[in-house]
Amino acid sequence: MLDDLDRLESEGIKLAPLDRRGWAFFVDELIVSVIFFIIFWDAIFIFKTPDQVVEAINSLVVYLLFIKIIYHTFFVWYQGASPGKMLLKMEVIQESDFENPGFLVSLNRAIGRVISEMLFYLGFVWAFLDPKRQAWHDKLARTLVVDV
C-alpha cells in the first residue's frame, strides 16, 4: 500500500480530494437525471397526481441504472473522466500503469458504482477510510481518481 502511494508521488500524481469528488458526483447525477427525464418525459408526466408520477419513475428505475452505466462507461473510457470530473479537473487512471482505463475496466467500474449506490452508498463511504481514496468501484476496477 505504501509502495503504491510512493509510486504515485514519484510520478508526480496527486490523488483527487474527496470533497471535489463529491461535487463531481453531484454534477454527474444532475446530468444523468436530465438525460433520464428527457428520454422518459412522456412516460412520466402523462400522470396527474404525484403518486402516479412516483410510481412511473419507480417502474423505470432499471432504465435509469442502465443510463448511468452507459454514461460512466462511455466517458471514463473515451475521455478518462465523466463530465463532472472533467469540470472539476480530475481523471480516472488505472492503478497498474496510470493510463486511462480501457472499455472493460470502465464498464466494470460503472457497474460497481451502481452497485455501491444500491448498497446505501457504502462503497463511496469506503473512500474516506482508504489511504488511496478508492471507493469500492475503484477497488473493483483497480482505478484511482487523480488531479489533472
Image (tube, grey):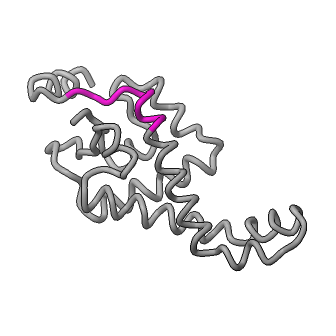
Task: Give the quadrant of the N terminus.
Answer: top left
Task: Give the quadrant of the C terminus.
Answer: top left
Which SS type dominates the magenta stretch? helix
Q: Nearer the viewer, residue 94 or 25?
A: 25
Asked whether 17 falls inside the magenta stretch, the response is yes
When the figure is inspected, residue 103 is found, relative to residue 18, above or below; the finding is below
Residue 115 locus on image (x, y percent) = 55, 53
Q: How many marks?
A: 0
Q: Which residue lies furthest to the left in this view?
A: 10
* Residue at x-position 74% and y-position 72%: 44
When the figure is inspected, residue 17 is found, relative to residue 55, above or below; the finding is above
Residue 96 is drawn in which quadrant? top left
* Residue at x-position 47% and y-position 53%: 112
Residue 101 locus on image (x, y percent) = 24, 54
* Residue at x-position 17% and y-position 28%: 8
The answer to whether residue 119 is left or right of residue 28 is: right
When the figure is inspected, residue 115 is found, relative to residue 44, above or below; the finding is above
The answer to whether residue 144 is left or right of residue 26 is: left
Residue 3 locus on image (x, y percent) = 19, 24
Q: Nearer the viewer, residue 64 or 52?
A: 52
Residue 58 locus on image (x, y percent) = 75, 65
The answer to whether residue 46 is left or right of residue 74 is: right
Residue range highlighted in magenta: 14-23
